[in-house]
Amino acid sequence: MRSVNENILSHVSLCESQPYNGSANKRYVQDALLERGREISDIVLRKNEDEDHPTIIFVCGSSKQMLKGVADVFLHIFSEFLSKLFFLIIFLNNAIC
């Protein structure tokens, strides 16, 4: 894909809940996000080294149900990351004291 090759995009995941080619290989946006959850949390929550190029995630679809599912997945991804970060901070503070 041209945009990925030119570093305009870093990753593209094609997801089709109703594939046109008749295959039974359904793939949902929520599943693709969960598969890359750690990478997404690292990219979004880390301090941006380059403030001129902030992290942007595009999610395209037409279902209101998909929107709720995507929001739930992002909540899961970030809450998991933040809880690990919280325990790491507590551990480091106790180790230093």
Image: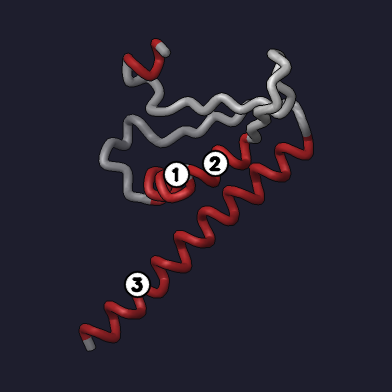
From this view, report whether residue 93 is shown above or below residue 27: below
Q: How many residues crowd mark 3 within 10 Å: few (<14), some (14–19), many (20+)?
A: few
Residue 73 percent across, percent down from the top left:
61, 49
Q: Which of 76 and 18 is in front in this view?
A: 18
From this view, report whether residue 8 is shown above or below residue 69: above
Task: Give the structural element (helix, strand or loop) at label 3.
Answer: helix
In the image, which is nearer the foreground, mark 3 or mark 2? 2
Q: Earlier in the sequence, mark 2 or mark 1?
A: 2
In the image, which is nearer the foreground, mark 2 or mark 1? 2
From this view, report whether residue 13 is shown above or below residue 74: above
Residue 11 percent across, percent down from the top left:
42, 28
Residue 20 percent across, percent down from the top left:
71, 15
- Which residue is identified by label 2? 33
Task: In the displayed orientation, state which residue is furthest to the right.
Answer: 64
Task: Give the structural element (helix, strand or loop) at label 2.
Answer: helix
Whole-angstrom CA distance, mark 3 to mark 2, is 24 Å
**Hey, what amino acid is under mark 2?**
Leu
- Image quarter of residue 18: top right
**Hey, what amino acid is under mark 3?**
Leu
- Which residue is identified by label 1? 40
Do tag 3 and tag 1 residues touch (Cβ < 8 Å)?
no
Do tag 2 and tag 1 residues touch (Cβ < 8 Å)?
yes
Q: Nearer the viewer, residue 91 or 24?
A: 24
- Which residue is identified by label 3? 88
Horizontal side, residue 23 vs residue 90: left or right: right
Task: Give the structural element (helix, strand or loop) at label 1.
Answer: helix
Horizontal side, residue 10 vs residue 96: left or right: right
Rendered residue at 73%/17% (across/down): 22
Q: Residue 84 carries which label?
A: none
